[in-house]
Amino acid sequence: MQQVERAEPQDFERVLSSMCTVPHPAARQAAERFLATNPGDPGTYETVAELERRAVEQLGTVAGLADPAGYVTSGGTEANIQAVRIARNRADTDDPNVVAPESAHFSFRKAANVLDVELRTAPTTDHTADVDAMQELIDGDTVCVVGVAGSTEYGYVDPIPALADVAADAGALCHVDAAWGGFYLPFSDHEWHFDHADIDTLTIDPHKVGQAAVPAGGLLSHSPDLFDELAIDTPYLESTSQVTLTGTRSGAGVASAVAAMDALWPEGYRETYERAMDNAEWLAEALEVRGHEVVGPELPLVAADLSVPMTDELRDRGWRVSKTGSGEMRVVCMPHVTRSMLRSFVADLDWY
């Protein structure tokens, strides 16, 4: 039999656009130990079920919520879909709509398609939600108002308290997507979480800046009653109902999220944020002095107006860089991105 060459995973030495990163060593070890457990069957897999409760408590601490309800999702997409599903299921309308800024993650388009909900997007101002423009789209059938805390294209943070007020006035839920920004924002001056505003649900992903193993997202709420909107009976399991979107889930993400947060909260994450912001500001300055127009950084993400051919050349040299919807190159300063990497990147830029 012919020997199959062993495949090796992508390394992170030239990855500059991903919002995933190298897991913390403790998270990697925990993921391996709990790989075959199933949090979707908590009656059988009691240990990982208890770890999930710990993960939710820890995420609540990060997101300013003392007594959180929630669960560990497969990622931000599932969490955002579930938040829209909660809003739709609790509302008294046959024609539900969700209002979001145009900077909202594409997972909200998936949610609208899957759940048969209209998605209304308002233009942004300087890449940030325009509250007045969103207000104009809200009507009696609006079930959810979305704010973004760390947008995936530019890393910008919406005015969450103002959006929460708009949602409350409309009788709609307020959902915050902090999937990427959630582990950077606690060390910034932004108002974005449950202790800052009257929000209802929040997405935050340990497998991004939290340095857990993939997949490990998170959905939180101030009220367990909101999750009742998702509950279905599970007659052949020891547990009587289930609120998750997926059924069987690997306990790897749950265990790794707990391990990462145990190891890093808060000081490890603070150091990561400060180093990442320093790197982002250094890169922004380096690009500006070379004549490029730069957006940010508000959080550790830099977008710049490099030409498409230049971006393609960089990819040919092994750099993993992507573009915004408007064509700017974006660099995400994740925990694995070092100053040495960025110096090499800029040196390659200087060839063009």
Image (spheres, grey):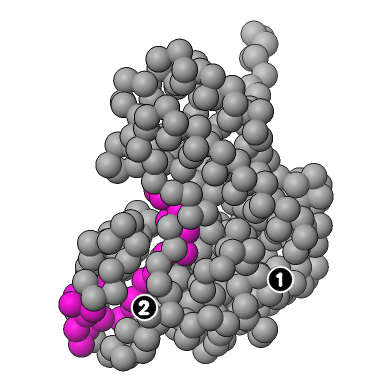
Residue 343 vertical placement versus 229 (above, below): above
Q: Is residue 233 left or right of residue 56?
A: left
Q: Nearer the viewer, residue 223 or 128?
A: 128
Question: Which residue is located at x 51 percent, y 72 percent?
Answer: 192
- Picture disc at residue 58: 1
Instruction: Quadrant for the C terminus, please.
Output: top left
For the record, the magenta segment spans 134-155
Packing grade of label 1 (10 A; few <14, some 14-19, many >=20) is: some
The percent position of residue 16, horizontal first and vertical second, equals 53, 34
Residue for badge 2:
163
Per the image, is 80 magenta?
no
Question: Which residue is located at x 45 percent, y 13 percent?
Answer: 351
CA distance for labels 1 and 2: 25 Å
Of marks 1 and 2, which one's residue comes earlier in the chain?
Answer: 1
Question: Which residue is located at x 60 percent, y 41 percent?
Answer: 279
Identity, as a three-letter code, of the amino acid under mark 2:
Leu
Instruction: Quadrant for the N terminus, please.
Output: top right
The percent position of residue 73, horizontal first and vertical second, equals 56, 62
Q: Is residue 344 left or right of residue 305?
A: right
The percent position of residue 158, horizontal first and vertical second, equals 40, 67
Mark 1 touches mark 2? (CB < 8 Å):
no
Viewer-nearest of discs 1 and 2: 2
Residue 241 vertical placement versus 308 (above, below): below
Q: Splitting the image into 4 quarters, where does residue 135 fall?
A: bottom left
Q: Nearer the viewer, residue 208 or 32?
A: 208
